């Protein structure tokens, strides 16, 4: 049973991240996702200090706010003339450092050690269950992630057309009267939410892997956004199941193995994708050259 | 706090952290100008599996070996980013995200393997994640300090070449410099700086040691030489602050404190940097407005005098009995009155 809950949690994390990651990869903001996943740490630490528990809904909101602040600061420094990747670097390291200091100073009050910050404790997810009377309703993390997934799915499907247009042609979107900035911040807010709910399971750094790697692999397999999202979700779920298997076999970090499994799938897509794979393209070129010589 | 000056061990640690910060700042200047700031982040995360493999193969904790392992892993990471961007339609930022998280994941898997298995002397390997300057032994310090010093000297010797590389590589190629080789060299030096910085600041935050001092220094000057020196200075200051404060308070890892010190430098630069800083911009805007008002007041005063002279002239004409000129004179008088008002409001 424990394996089931862990895989379910992993699959939910991967699904949340994969859906949003597609838009991040298309908008060339993969590193903003990286920045947000680090920057929400002070929000999480403060929420811990205030509420004394993990997994509350307020924590989600608080962290989403901190995510907003991070994106806002990045934009602010960029418009002030700092290069974009440097401003990302300055903002996320500063916020992450604040978070680490808060956690280490209040180590007694915060039930969260620094290893967990980096690579999560998905193995303990099943012990922290939601009780309703005498009834055990399953791990809290699953409920939190389910809620997050519901919000993400609702928002993305409701504004699918707008998100799509903003991802591919922001100028056209603006010309058509779509508030591009609003959708930008909406996407960033969703990314913050997904990061925070996944945080406990996979940690700050490995969230980035699930945000970027499955969508990037899917991007190599298809040219359609809808298919890309679907493929990314499938790749994410396969990574969480295969990663859990590998982790049990190797006796190593589950979250780390999940990201490694995603990496293997990306490598396969990179080499053997029917349309964009390295090996397939080479072979097609050679076939064309041979055919040309024969003809 | 005072024991810092009397305790020789702490003094060495302080000196070592300063050297590490200095080399990070100096190298960071060049990677900032080459718009490759976040490559340091990728290299740092990628160093983790290298360190773990070096430990698993040899079973000893030696900074020299870790340096070699991390260098090889860093080289593999940069190669992967280049390969992914060259041979597929993945953009550089996503490629960096992929390589960063994948290498880090491999590192985490190896680290947990090490922790779960019976490698005896593994304690302290996880200090690499957040940095603990106080855990450095004196031989580590000699190695790291020496490497950091070499880095700074290399940058000094190749200053002219790197300057060309940052600002006009095409011109450099025209002059006959091997630009490709220099680029690889700078990348290699960046990797070394990141790897030695890890000991002081940790894998996750070492990127800040490269980026933040360089960005702060950019606020103060337009000259590369000054910027390099300033960035090195900011880096050394933050390294010292991190080592000092974290040696006093036991729960605090060194890395975040150093990063916060560097961030404080950055905020000060954003606020008070000459010309680019917020205060300078506000002051400049205000003085420009005052100048404009003064000028327009001067113009208004001149216009006043002219208008008055015209008015008297026209009044003289009017007294001659040619009433039709009055209509022409009127707007002039009107605008003079306006100018008067504006002058008064200043």
Image (tube, coloured by chain):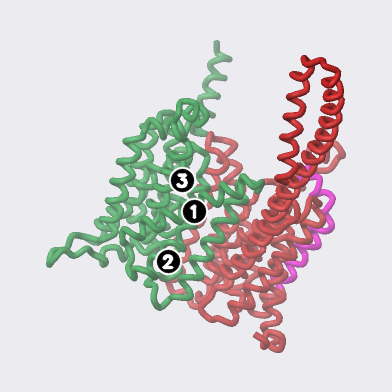
Mark 2 vs mark 1, CA separation in Å = 16 Å
Report the side of B62 relative to A21 (left or right).
right
- Image x and y of residue B203, in percent: 56, 63
Mark 3 vs mark 1, CA separation in Å = 22 Å
The earlier-in-sequence mark between 3 and 1 is 1
Name the residue located 53 percent from the left edge and 75 percent from the top edge: B252
Mark 3 falls within which chain?
A
Q: Which residue is mark 3?
A: A212
Which sits in the foreground, B266 or A248?
A: B266
Q: Which chain is green in the picture?
A: A
Mark 2 vs mark 3, CA separation in Å = 25 Å
Is disc 2 surrounded by few (<14), some (14 to 19) or many (20+) residues within 10 Å? many
Name the residue located 12 percent from the left edge and 67 percent from the top edge: A134
Mark nearer the viewer, 2 or 3: 2
Over which residues does the magenta segment extend?
B143-169
Q: Which residue is mark 2?
A: A45
**Residue furthest out toward the top:** A295
| Quadrant into which the N terminus of chain B falls | bottom right
Mark 2 falls within which chain?
A
The earlier-in-sequence mark between 2 and 3 is 2
- Give SS at disc 3: helix
Which sits in the foreground, A66 or B104?
A: A66
Mark nearer the viewer, 2 or 1: 1
Asked if marks 2 and 3 touch (Cβ < 8 Å), the reply is no
Asked if marks 2 and 1 touch (Cβ < 8 Å), the reply is no
């Amino acid at each position: 049973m424990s394996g089931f809950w862990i895989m379910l949690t992993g699959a939910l994390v991967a699904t949340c991240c994969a859906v949003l990651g597609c838009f991040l990869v298309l908008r060339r903001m993969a590193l903003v996702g990286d920045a947000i996943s680090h920057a929400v740490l002070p929000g999480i630490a403060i929420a811990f200090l205030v509420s004394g528990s993990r997994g509350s809904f307020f924590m989600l909101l608080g962290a989403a706010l901190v995510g907003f602040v991070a994106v806002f600061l990045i934009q602010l420094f960029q418009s002030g003339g700092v290069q974009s990747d440097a401003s990302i670097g300055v903002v996320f390291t500063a916020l992450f450092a604040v978070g680490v200091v808060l956690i280490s100073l209040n180590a007694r009050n915060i039930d969260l050690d620094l290893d967990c910050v980096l690579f999560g404790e998905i193995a303990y997810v099943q012990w922290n269950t939601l009780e309703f009377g005498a009834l055990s309703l399953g791990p809290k993390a699953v409920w939190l992630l389910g809620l997050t997934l519901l919000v993400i799915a609702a928002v993305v499907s409701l504004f699918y057309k707008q998100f799509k247009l903003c991802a591919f042609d922001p100028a056209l979107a603006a010309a058509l009267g779509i508030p591009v900035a609003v959708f930008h911040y909406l996407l960033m807010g969703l990314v913050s939410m997904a990061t925070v709910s996944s945080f406990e399971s996979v940690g700050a750094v490995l969230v980035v892997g699930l945000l970027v790697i499955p969508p990037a692999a899917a991007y190599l397999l298809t040219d359609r956004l809808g298919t890309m999202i679907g493929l990314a979700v499938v790749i994410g779920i396969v990574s969480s199941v295969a990663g859990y298997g590998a982790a049990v076999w190797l006796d190593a970090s589950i979250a780390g193995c999940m990201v490694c499994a995603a990496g293997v799938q990306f490598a396969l897509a990179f080499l053997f994708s029917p349309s964009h794979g390295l090996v397939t393209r080479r072979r097609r070129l050679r076939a064309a050259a041979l055919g040309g010589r024969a003809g | 706090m005072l024991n810092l000056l009397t305790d020789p061990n702490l003094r060495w640690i302080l000196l070592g952290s300063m050297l590490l910060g200095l080399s990070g700042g100096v190298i960071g200047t060049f990677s900032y100008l080459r718009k490759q700031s976040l490559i340091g982040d990728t290299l740092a995360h990628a160093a983790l599996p290298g360190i773990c493999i070096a430990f698993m193969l040899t079973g000893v904790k030696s900074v020299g070996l870790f340096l070699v392992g991390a260098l090889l892993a860093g080289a593999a990471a940069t190669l992967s980013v280049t390969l992914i961007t060259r041979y597929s339609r993945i953009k550089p930022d996503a490629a960096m995200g992929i390589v960063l998280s994948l290498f880090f994941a491999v590192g985490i898997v190896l680290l947990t393997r090490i922790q779960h298995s019976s490698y005896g002397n593994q304690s302290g390997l996880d200090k690499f994640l957040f940095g603990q300057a106080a855990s450095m032994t004196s031989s580590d310090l000699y190695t790291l300090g020496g490497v950091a010093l070499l880095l700074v000297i290399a940058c000094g010797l190749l200053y002219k070449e790197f300057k060309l590389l940052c600002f006009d590589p095409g011109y450099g190629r025209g002059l006959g410099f091997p630009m490709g080789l220099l680029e690889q060299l700078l990348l290699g030096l960046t990797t070394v700086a990141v790897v030695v910085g890890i000991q002081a600041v940790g894998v996750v935050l070492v990127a800040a040691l490269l980026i933040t001092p360089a960005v702060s220094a950019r606020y103060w000057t337009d000259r590369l030489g000054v910027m390099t020196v300033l960035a090195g200075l900011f880096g050394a200051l933050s390294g010292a602050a991190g080592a000092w404060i974290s040696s006093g308070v036991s729960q605090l890892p060194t890395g975040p404190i150093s990063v916060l010190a560097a961030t404080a430098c950055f905020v000060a630069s954003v606020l008070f940097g000459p010309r680019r800083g917020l205060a300078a911009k506000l002051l400049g805007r205000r003085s420009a407005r005052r100048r404009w008002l003064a000028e327009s007041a001067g113009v208004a005063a001149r216009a006043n005098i002219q208008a008055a002279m015209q008015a008297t002239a026209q009044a003289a004409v009017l007294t001659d009995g040619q009433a039709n000129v009055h209509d022409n004179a009127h707007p002039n008088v009107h605008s003079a009155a306006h100018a008067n008002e504006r002058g008064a409001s200043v």
